[in-house]
Amino acid sequence: MRPQIERVFRFVLGLSFLPEKIRAWMFSTGTRAIEVLNAGMLLAWATVMMLDGRVLEMHPYRYFMLFGTQWAHKVWAVAFLIFFVLTCGGIACKTCRCKKLGGFAMLASATVWGGISAGFVASYPPLNTGVLIYALMSLMCWFTGEHLMYTARSGACTDCSEGGNECGAP
């Protein structure tokens, strides 16, 4: 029984259930996994904001109501969706323009995650994991965005030397 359990753990933890092409695509660059995680979090937040704006009434998220209580969840849902689309655009394309777009989306997301972390700090006590998780996500997104922008500026993209503007999966 023990070898079967070990095989299952290796299958799941080694991401063996994913087809080889998807695993190669996901982990071919150090930034892509962070971009995909960020896109998923942005989509989750947008979905929550669209379905039930009462989440903003929770203490750590009250500062989101900059636009008033009636429209705040709708404004933030649109903002999260815009960042989600920009992040997906940066993931899907390998041109310099798309890398800049993806880098901008990651930097903007880092600011949002940092703000959420600050909201958790402001609601202290009690200390909770939201502070550290969102702060860590903010740092990862910031460094990823900076790397994508640096890559685009340095010309390490598919279209920089050729002058083309075609998007395609790497």
Image (tube, grey):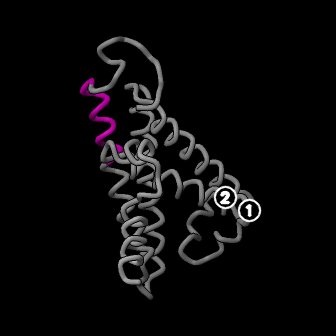
Residue furthest left in the image:
154
Q: Residue at x 39, y 52 (%)?
A: 34
Q: Main secondary structure of the magenta part?
A: helix
Q: Nearer the viewer, residue 50 or 89?
A: 89
- Which residue is painted at 43% across and 68% down in the image? 117
Circle 1/circle 2 CB separation < 8 Å: yes
Q: Dot 1 lies on which element?
A: helix
Is 78 on the left or on the right of 113, as rendered? right
Q: Quadrant of residue 53?
A: bottom right
Measured as percent of width and height from the top left, residue 84 is found at: 55, 46
Question: Is 106 left, or right, of 44 in this rendering?
Answer: left
The front one of 40 and 9 is 9
User: Where 3 sits versus 113, above or below?
Assistant: below
Q: Position of residue 103 (x, y in %)?
A: 39, 39
Q: In this picture, is 44 found above or below 166? A: below
* Residue type for callout 2: Thr
Say which amino acid is labelled 1.
Answer: Leu
Would residue 107 be seen by someone viewing this image from the given angle? no
